[in-house]
Image (cartoon, rainbow, N blue to C red):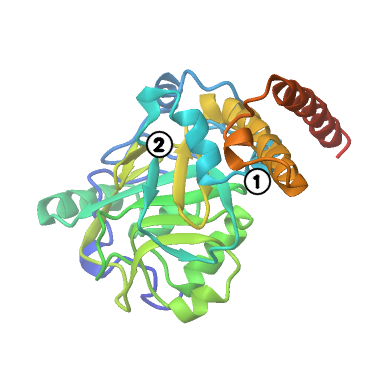
Amino acid sequence: MNGTKGKLKPAGVAAWCFALTLSVCGASISRAQLFTFSKQELIDYTQGQPFDRFPDGRPKVPDELLARARELSAEDVWATLQQHKDFSNQYADGFQVLHPGKPMVGRAFTVQFMPLRADLDEVAKAKAKSRGLPGLYNQIAIDLLQPGDVLVVDLFSKKEGGTIVGDNLFYYVNKATAGGGLVVDGSVRDLNGIAEIEMPAYVRAVDPSPIGNVMLTGINIPIRIAGVTVMPGDLVVGDREGVYFVPPQLVQETLDRADEIHVHDEWTKKKFEEGKYKSTDIYGSPKDPKLQQEYREYLKKRLEEIRKARQHK
């Protein structure tokens, strides 16, 4: 930590309504924040997800599916989610993208800030003191990150004083998440230093000020990033265009559908390369029945090859 870099200013140090109690390993938080879910509430609100969970109840998309998701594009995800009309608000764009050629994939670790309000700040300070805590900083959330996480932060598009990290804390996030990434509806500082660290990041702005005049109000709760409701444990997929937040129960379907899309694109380009067909003959689907049958056989064969190749990795 660089002095005040990446730290809440004194006026906002303990700006929570309730202090946090950390476990010895730092992997769980008591139900002591202004807004939080208990483990059971996290389970209740994500009951449709099919995977294991972290000790706090957050869904844990398997590592092997995270690896597959590195091949996804925004269009791949859209192809599945647009079929589920109740999940049509899962895409956010308009970010400054750091390392746009590096895909971002991971499990959402959500953090929420609000504008500082003095009466809440005083209560939070008193509660922190009663628990023997000298102060509460934004590092409280950062220190809970796990490998494979993407830190997703609602900082209400704040630029000045909305800098969730500078280069030192960005480096820490990179190490803690094993390169997972950062999405902040807010800002960062120390861009020159951050740009040298190979972790993908999506930010609204850059500003030289340290974070301040805000209060940390939630960790691993539902948050809003632009027009998206993000849940803890969502699969986060970022490319050059923007970021998708995929509900865990749709991850497997999204990946399987993406395999089909990739094979379809592969076959389409092969047919174009032959120089025998117009685009309307082949794309988006072949018109001739013989070509349709050829495509179906190609799709079946290639999907089998892809699945066998994954099994042998």
**Image point 66% across, 31% down: which residue?**
260
Q: Residues within 10 Å of mark 2 (few under 14, many from 20)?
A: some
304 relative position to 283: left or right:
right
**Which image quarter is the C terminus in?**
top right
Count of residue discs: 2
**Label at residue 71:** 1
Q: Quadrant of residue 140?
A: bottom left
**Label at residue 226:** none
Can residue 153 be seen at all in this image of the molecule? Answer: yes
255 relative position to 40: left or right:
right
Q: Quadrant of residue 214?
A: bottom left
The residue carrying mark 2 is: 30
Q: Position of residue 234 (x, y in %)?
A: 48, 36
In the image, is residue 199 above or below residue 21? below
Q: Position of residue 222 (x, y in %)?
A: 34, 36
In the image, is residue 184 above or below residue 82? below
Q: Position of residue 25 (x, y in %)?
A: 57, 45
Q: Residues within 10 Å of mark 1 (few under 14, many from 20)?
A: some
At label 1, the amino acid type is Glu
197 relative position to 204: left or right:
right
Q: SS for tag 1?
A: loop
